Image: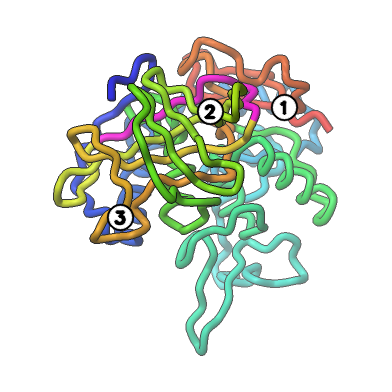
Amino acid sequence: MEEKGVSSIIVVIAIVVSLTVVAVAAIGAYYLMNRGGGNEVVADNELISALNWLRENTPENSTVAIDWSLGHLCNSIARRRTIWDGAENLGEEGKWENTTGVRPPDYIYYKIGSARYIYGIDVPARPWAINGRRIDIQRLPMMDDREFRWLIQTYRENYKCQIDYVIFYKSWVTPENSYYGAWYPAWSMWANGFWKAQAASFAKDGQNHVFNFGENRENVVLDPQGNVFLQTDNTKKSLAGYVSIYLDNNGTLTNINFNYPTPTPDIPETLLVFYFENNDVIVRASYNTNIAPSLFDLSISMDVRVFSQILYNADYLAGIDYWLENVYTSPGGQITVCRVNY
């Protein structure tokens, strides 16, 4: 299927998708290691510029949500509190894990026998749930606006922890890092089994691909221009967008496409479709029955909204009664600081 105006990347990494857990871990590790186009998330001068701005332009009691590995720099250069500073005192390891007296704890885990399983590390992070400070802050840029708002409000109301500023990284939505922040949220939800529905059937209508997910989602249409909508009688209701995953005959991931054509979808859901390299839809793979067209209760990720000018030459934060405001962009455009307006 020809896709016009759609972002496409080639993933040069051999991952057999039938081994779901291994595949997800490998893809995640690969992109997290390479997301900054170098050895770090962002260039040093870009980060320092943003931290200096925070120190000079924000109240001293402000709290910043920043990547956990950079939290200690925010503390020392910006002189502002962070949700997680990436440091742990010798002899204090694990003190704040799963502890009700610390709100919220660094990590949350459950036990089976003597083994413990940390959410977001040993087992998948749960959507719409508190998974511990480090995991929550890592996930913030990849949440959609609804879950993002929910987590911000939950920290404030339940834990008396008001997040005033959030740091976003351009590198997560650039071709050098394979637009990681744009497609990974849907991929991760699929890999962890968090789909809303999987297609009962698939058909072609001219150049359109039509998916039947049942339950008022019988005609979800993906057109050649990369638009996704629910067709009901003579009405089209737009979905947030789609992600397509291309596999070779061995189940190895070879290519990824994505598109989020409008900042205000009628239905905040994302479609994920698997294709063979010849563009045939994989209705359900024999080697892994989870490989099937899937629908997610997932709208546009916050990374895509914040950096939508790069992807779509449009401001996806504007004009929708938004409570998140872009207040600073570093000189090279690598870092954006957003203020939460309560």
Going by the numbered disc 3, the residue's amino acid type is: Ala
Q: Is residue 43 visible?
A: no
Q: Quadrant of residue 166?
A: top right
Q: Position of residue 162 (x, y in %)?
A: 79, 43
Question: What span is in magenta?
Answer: 255-266
Q: Quadrant of residue 237?
A: top right
111 in relation to 88, above or below: below
Give the residue furthest to the front. Answer: 233
Looking at the picture, the colour scheme in use is: rainbow
Marks 1 and 2, the one that precedes in the sequence = 2
Identify residue for label 3.
23
State if disc 3 and disc 1 touch (CB < 8 Å).
no
- Name above or below for residue 331 compared with residue 245: above
In the picture, measured across the screen, residue 82 lies left or right of residue 278, that is right
Residue bearing the label numbered 1: 324
* Residue marked by disc 2: 229
For residue 81, say whether it is visible. Answer: yes
Q: Name the residue located 61 percent from the left edge and 38 percent from the top edge.
A: 144
What is the three-letter code of the residue carrying label 2?
Phe
Percent x, y of residue 55: 70, 27
Q: Is residue 297 left or right of residue 257?
A: right
Q: Who comes first in sequence, dot 3 or dot 2?
A: 3
Q: Is residue 53 depicted above or below 216 in this figure? A: above
Q: Position of residue 104 (x, y in %)?
A: 72, 60
Q: CA distance from mark 1 to mark 3?
A: 34 Å
Element carrying mark 3: helix
Q: Quadrant of the C terminus?
A: top right
Most foreground residue, 4 or 133: 4
Tell me the residue at 82%/56% (across/down).
Answer: 158
* Amino acid of disc 1: Leu
Looking at the image, which residue is at 63% across and 59% down?
132
Question: Does the magenta portion include 258?
Answer: yes
